[in-house]
Image (spheres, rainbow, N blue to C red):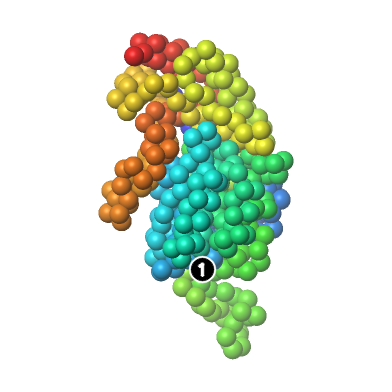
Amino acid sequence: MIPYGRQEITDADIEAVIGVLKSDYLTQGPKVPEFEKSVTDYCKVKHGIAVNSATSALHVACLALGVGEGDMVWTSPITFVASANCARFCGADIDFVDIDPKTYNMCPVALEKKLKQAAIDKRLPKVVIPVHLTGQSCEMKALKELSDQYDFAIIEDACHAIGGCYNGLPIGNCKYSDITVFSFHPVKIITTAEGGMAVTNSNHLAASMQLARSHGITRDSEKFEGSSDGAWYYQQICLGYNYRMTDMQAALGISQIRRLSEVIKLRHSVAKRYNTLLSEMPILLPYQDPNNYSAFHLYVIRIDDCNLARREVVFDYLRDCGIGVNVHYIPVHTQPYYKKLGFKSGDFPHAEDYYTNAISIPMYHHLKNEDQDHIVASLIKVVENTEQ
Ligand SMILES: *Cc1c(COP(=O)(O)O)cnc(C)c1O
């Protein structure tokens, strides 16, 4: 099966991990801060807090921003469930903002409209979590202006987007947000097996996320209540978790990020080749905003005049051809857990419309031309055969 996304592990990656296995520290050693520095250097941002998943990064980001019971967090309905769940971990309420039908990202116009109503209802969000779907940034400038006007914080869910740029700046530089979150799950752009990172320019948010990552414990005597008992001493000053990344994972990340720019370039050539090979088909290809340089985590197509039933035929046919297509994503508000909280089908029409005919076809930087040709040929065949 040609998967929809796949990691690449080189000999250098393997050597890097073995190096840690033979060293003194499997966790809490030098590799985690070194990986944090390689990510913050790449993204031109001040602080990086490596954790064991992007889900944990979203959680500590919400905690650092003070999200708690009675607060409201908004995100996009077209995302992985973790973008919404992080608010629920903190006991906050969640709501969604419909997508832009062209980019599939959170729509700034829909956001402004919802904010105006929320201001009247006195139910403004504390945090908004835009998601850079497929690796293309949201319109962060517009979102940042709204955040200044309506006084909410922004966490960028950039799980798809490390290595991409927005307005010429690397995604993750936090010019238009408080915190940006990355995932290093194997299906994403670069991997640490499991892993994530939260980056920020704020000293106090960084300190707060560092505490939340490791039990709320500090060894910094300046943060102590009272004085230190001795060199062994630490204090737990808040409630935290064990969300730490290991040094083995960090070493893999350091090795992987060295080829990030190259990986993104290759993803663009795969996308370009799809664009050419599919240009004559009744298929909507991924729209690229001119201010964006996507990381191209996903290549999402939408088949013209397609409904759920036809999409299923196309999808099953491609799977039968050994092509690991997928759908990103089922609108979060239609998940049973969220329906129980009061959401229903029809709440976010653009998101639901997108869901009826979107298909992610394989996209990774080492996708072979012959595999891509097989994907395209199979796709053309099934689209033509199912035309209504
Ligand atoms: C993958 C992903 C996550 C969760 O990442 P993990 O590292 O698996 O916890 C969150 N949000 C989005 C948009 C993702 O794609």
Q: Position of residue 127 (x, y in %)?
A: 51, 59
Q: Is residue 33 left or right of residue 341?
A: right
Q: Nearer the viewer, residue 247 or 64?
A: 64
What amino acid type is highlighted by mark number 1? Gly
* Residue name at image x 61 percent, y 88 percent: 227
Q: Nearer the viewer, residue 143 or 92?
A: 143
Question: Is residue 288 something one can see in this rendering?
Answer: yes
Question: Is residue 7 something one can see in this rendering?
Answer: no
Where 260 sits versus 53, above or below? Answer: above
* Residue name at image x 66 percent, y 33 percent: 290
Where the C terminus falls, by quadrant? top left
Please, what secondary structure does the residue beneath circle 1 have?
A: loop
Where 211 sits versus 372, above or below? Answer: below
Q: Nearer the viewer, residue 337 or 188?
A: 337
Q: Position of residue 172 (x, y in %)?
A: 63, 49
Where the N terminus falls, by quadrant? top left
Q: Residues within 10 Å of mark 1 (few under 14, many from 20)?
A: some
* Residue name at image x 66 percent, y 42 percent: 166
Q: Nearer the viewer, residue 279 or 263?
A: 279
Q: How many marks?
A: 1
Residue on which the image places disc 1: 66
Quarter of the image for residue 353 reads top left
Label 1 beta carbon less than 8 Å to ligand 1: no
Q: Position of residue 159 (x, y in %)?
A: 53, 45
Q: Position of residue 285 (x, y in %)?
A: 52, 24
- The residue most toward the front is 120
Where 207 sits versus 25, above or below? Answer: below
* Residue name at image x 63 percent, y 69 percent: 204
Quarter of the image for residue 260 reads top right
